[in-house]
Image (cartoon, grey):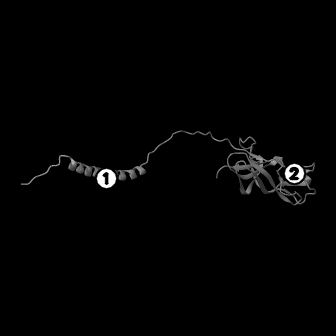
Amino acid sequence: MRTTEFDFSGAEQQAKTKKRKRKVVIASVIGAAVLIPGAAWAAVNIFGFGNFEAAAAANGTLQIVDGTAGLTKTLAPGQTVGVKGNVKNTNDYDITVTDLYVKKAGLQVTGGDNATVCKVSFAGGTDAAYPKADGSGFEANGTAVKFELATPAVIPAGFTKQITVADVIKQDASATKMCGVKADYAVGAKVGN
């Protein structure tokens, strides 16, 4: 006859439970290892909201630096000279100087000399309207002579640059005197391209 022994101490049951627990722990670790990389790639979108408003900028200004405007060389009979001056960009953005406008009525002989004796005139340019000092537009057409810069000059915000325009004023070769001149002028510039 065969005898079967029964273990009533629960040792056998405990051994089976330990194996089962071990399998559950291993499965949990493998499951966690699979989920963790996925969590590292998950993205959560977070937003902050606000608004901005800016009024249109006023038309900017340029400043001709006092004492820097003049002729590029001495005006003499038979000579053509240019005009130069330091222009300061008082804006907080870059500008590009493109033109020089000389007021026709403003071109005058100085030093008490007679305009007939001096024979001073413009050395080219095109008829144009002279810009109003308050920036509100232009005077009547034909009030100025416009000269384009050979190479437009970019002036960064807050910087000063010498602007030179060649061949603006001439004195006829038949003039019998060396003469001084003066004129009102403005520089034209643009913002952007």
- Which residue is most to the left? 1
Of residues 100 and 21, the one drawn nearer to the viewer in this rendering: 21
The kind of secondary structure element at disc 1 is: helix
With 88 as the anchor, is 179 left or right in this view? right
The three-letter code of the residue at mark 1 reads: Ile
Q: Residue at x 43, y 48 (%)?
A: 43
Residue 192: numbered disc: none
Q: Residue at x 34, y 51 (%)?
A: 29
Estimate the x, y position of residue 4 in percent, counting from the top left.
11, 52
Q: Earlier in the sequence, mark 2 or mark 1?
A: 1
Which quadrant does the N terminus fall into? Answer: bottom left
The kind of secondary structure element at disc 2 is: strand
With 29 as the anchor, is 114 left or right in this view? right
Of residues 84 and 147, the one drawn nearer to the viewer in this rendering: 84
Estimate the x, y position of residue 120 in percent, counting from the top left.
86, 54
Residue 26: numbered disc: 1
Estimate the x, y position of residue 179 in percent, counting from the top left.
90, 54
Few, some or many C-alpha atoms within 10 Å of disc 1 (few <14, some 14-19, many ≥20)? few
Few, some or many C-alpha atoms within 10 Å of disc 2 (few <14, some 14-19, many ≥20)? some
Task: Report the residue marked by disc 2.
Answer: 181
Name the mark nearer the viewer: 2 or 1.
1
Give the Cα separation between the discs numbered 2 and 1: 100 Å
